[in-house]
Image (cartoon, rainbow, N blue to C red):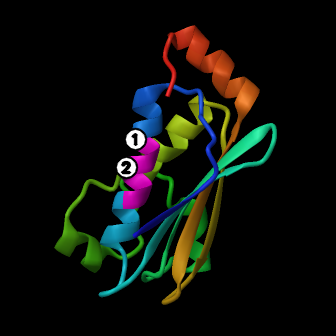
Amino acid sequence: MTLEGDSAPIFGIRRLMESIAFNLIDNAIKYNKENGTVDVSVKDLGDKIRFSVADSGIGIPEDDIPRIFERFYRVDKSHSREIGGTGLGLSIVKHAAILQHAKIDVQSVPEQGTMFSITFDKEECKKQAEAQDETL
């Protein structure tokens, strides 16, 4: 696993930010290949911050991508049974991102890997955090 990026403090709701990071990194590890890689990065884009998690794992077929944020949806049911989980992780990520006015982008190629990017608007996150009286 690698971690790289800019110093880019994100104002947000701590529990939601932790849920986003945990679920994306957990999935990148679970659905990876043996000896695969997980790359986590943070980029300061001026008025936005992008948090990305990329893996060299099993990937997601293009037809499944629109459904992966549905509760309990699993792309590879046999693999999911082996590793456990509830099928709620990406649904949690989606709702946490929505609540913080962030946008999610998914790029995936079967057998090559997947990258999830969450782009936060700094001003929107700050407003939301102030309303909740929390910062990260």
Q: Which residue is mark 1?
A: 19
Residue 58 in the image, given as x and y percentages of width and height: 43, 83
- Find residue 35 and report its image quarter: bottom left
Please, is residue 48 above or below residue 27 in the view? above
Whether residue 122 is in magenta: the answer is no
- Find residue 74 and report its image quarter: bottom left
Looking at the rendering, the stretch of residues picked out in magenta corresponds to 19-25
**Left or right: where does residue 30 sit relative to residue 73?**
left
Number of the label disc, if any, that sits on residue 22: 2
- Find residue 117 and report its image quarter: bottom right
Q: In the image, what residue type sits under mark 1?
A: Ser
Q: How would you rate the neighbour count of disc 2 (Cα within 10 Å): few for under 14, some for 14-19, many for 20 or more? A: some
Please, is residue 58 above or below residue 2 in the view? below
Q: Residue at x 27, y 70 (%)?
A: 80
The residue most toward the front is 7
Q: In the image, what residue type sits under mark 2?
A: Phe
